[in-house]
Image (cartoon, rainbow, N blue to C red):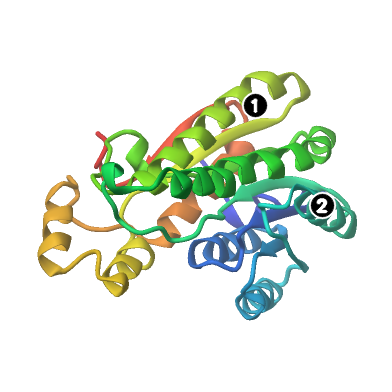
Amino acid sequence: MSEHDLSADFADRAGAALVVGGSGGLGSVIAAELAARGSDVALTYRSNAGAAAAAAAEIERLGRRSWVAAADLADDAVTSAAVTDLAGAAGGLHTVVYAAGPHVPQTHLSRIEPAAMRAQLDADAAGFFAVAVAALSHLRESKGSIVAITTAGLGRFPARDGLSTVPKAAVTAAVRGLAAEEGRYGVRINSVGPGMLSDGMAQRLIASGDLDDRALDAARSNIPLHTFGTAADVAEAVCFLASARAGYITGQHLAVDGGYTA
């Protein structure tokens, strides 16, 4: 069997990949990996224009074109306009990666105010749906795909992570529904569920005081591989699902969690 040239994964695809939340730590790594695999990349960001510009510069350093737009996913009109404008600038979309989602505090469900859960459902689950609806016409034309970043917590609930896991469960339900309905147009929709990442979630939880060394050791003991993953591990899964190598895969959830949900 000949070795697959990963840099050619998207080289023959017209248009670009859109990474929603491309200014974030995870989104920017995914954007760079898509560029390394031969794709032009468009990015959205909510408030960190500097991080978005840095991500775009990395894409261009890798020899691909980039476009950037601000988009608050709580505003459906703004979201739709950003997707439409970026698709127009790029000449279409072949992939949409949903990598948005703010850091949320670690809190037991019994201590979460309903208003806080409602706000998170609106920002994350409804935000994903707004992106998908805006992108579908472009993806139908390209027979493209959506990959949503959710959480490994869907398969094994991590205590105190309800503000993240509950909305991501809604996103995953939408992924399955869209996959069932959009397959007739050649559009695939899948999700990737990261576990604990050494260069992402763990750092944020330590900085916020939610995890100390003892808690981190306990978290590692719950992972069969006894180590945390990286953003690069997640980007690898995203690129696979978005590529033609996964052309017969849709409606699926791929946990990248070191076996946490095994």
Label for residue 15? Answer: 2
Instruction: Give above or below for 178 relative to 18.
Output: above
Q: Secondary structure at mark 2?
A: loop
Quarter location, residue 49: bottom right
Residue 3 makes an appearance in the image: no
Q: Quadrant of the C terminus?
A: top left
Is residue 198 found left or right of 51 in the rendered image? left
Q: CA distance from mark 2 to mark 1?
A: 22 Å
Residue 159 appears in the figure? yes
Percent across and percent down for residue 77 are 81, 50
- Whether pointer 2 and pointer 1 mark residues with C-beta atoms closer than 8 Å, the reply is no
Q: Say which mark, if any, is on residue 178.
A: 1
What is the x, y in percent for residue 161? 32, 48
Residue sitting at 21 percent across and 57 percent down?
A: 227
Q: Residue drawn at (72%, 60%), measured in percent from left and top? A: 71
Amino acid type, callout 1: Leu
Residue 211, percent from left and from top: 21, 65
Q: Is residue 72 left or right of residue 227?
A: right
In the rendered view, tell whether residue 149 sits above or below residue 43: above
- Please report the residue visible at 71 percent of the width from the left and 30 percent of the height from the top: 187
Give neighbour class at mark 1: few <14, some 14-19, many 20+ (Cα, 10 Å).
Answer: many
Density class for disc 2 (Cα within 10 Å; few <14, some 14-19, many ≥20) is many
Front residue of 52/262: it is 52
